[in-house]
Each structure stands twice: as C-alpha cells, then as structure tokens.
Amino acid sequence: MTEAQRYSELSQDVAGRAKVQVAKIDAVVDETIQGAQDAGTAARRALIKPIRQVDGLVAGIRSAVSTYSRRNQAGISDATQDEEMFI
C-alpha cells in the first residue's frame, strides 16, 4: 500500500467519523430545542391558568358590585317616590 493510499483511506475514515459526530450533535441540538420549546409551553400554560382564574374572579366581583349598586339605586328611587306620595 502506498503512502497516498493510506492518506486517502485515513481521510475517508476521518470524514466518515466526522459525519457521524455531526449527526449526533444535530440530534442533541434538536432534542435541546424541543425541550426548551416544551418548557416554554408548560411555563406559559402555568402562568395563563392563574391569570384566567383571577380574571374570572374579578369579573364576578364586578358583576356583584354592579348588581348591588343597581339594587340600591332602585330602592332609593322607590323610597323617594313613596315619601313624595305621603307628603
């Protein structure tokens, strides 16, 4: 075997091994990116759920206050009309 043939085989071996390592690195990077995306999705869901619950609570309180204030206003105007009838 000549020196040129050994260098050729060596360079082919190195190129083959490099391709395998690049494929492994690519797979690791893909898994890392997917894991980061999954973590971001989970964090977003974990954050949005309590916000929606608080939003629902605030909407309920607003509705209760609105209903209570309407009742009080109607009661006051009815009482005023009744008092005017007796005067």
Image: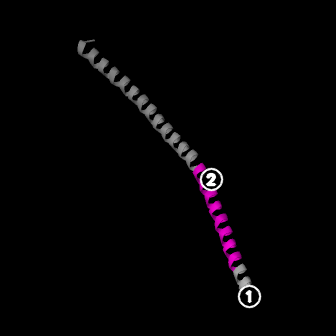
The kind of secondary structure element at disc 1 is: helix
Report the coloring of the rendering: one colour
Mark 1 crowdedness (10 Å alpha carbons): few <14, some 14-19, many ≥20:
few
Residue 28 located left or right of residue 18: right
Residue 57 is a magenta residue: yes
Of mark 1 and mark 2, the one earlier in the sequence is 2
Mark 2 crowdedness (10 Å alpha carbons): few <14, some 14-19, many ≥20:
few
Q: Which mark is residue 46?
A: none
Residue 71 is a magenta residue: yes
Of the 4 image quadrants, the one containing the N terminus is top left
Instruction: Determine the residue positioned at 31% across, 17% down.
Output: 10
Q: Nearer the viewer, residue 68 or 31?
A: 68
- Residue identifier under label 1: 85
The kind of secondary structure element at disc 2 is: helix
Instruction: Looking at this view, name the residue that lies furthest to the right.
Output: 86
Residue 82 position in % (x across, y down): 74, 83
Instruction: Determine the residue positioned at 40% across, 26% down.
Output: 21
Residue 28 position in % (x across, y down): 45, 31
Residue 31 position in % (x across, y down): 48, 35
- Residue type beneath disc 1: Met
Q: Which mark is residue 53?
A: 2
Q: What secondary structure is the stretch in magenta mostly built from?
A: helix
Examine the image and state in which quarter residue 22 appears: top left
- Residue type beneath disc 2: Gln
Q: Nearer the viewer, residue 80 or 15?
A: 80
Examine the image and state in which quarter residue 69 appears: bottom right
Q: What's the distance in space between the residues labelled 1 and 2, CA to CA?
A: 48 Å
Q: Which residues are magenta?
A: 49-77
Residue 73 position in % (x across, y down): 66, 74
Q: Nearer the viewer, residue 4 or 81?
A: 81
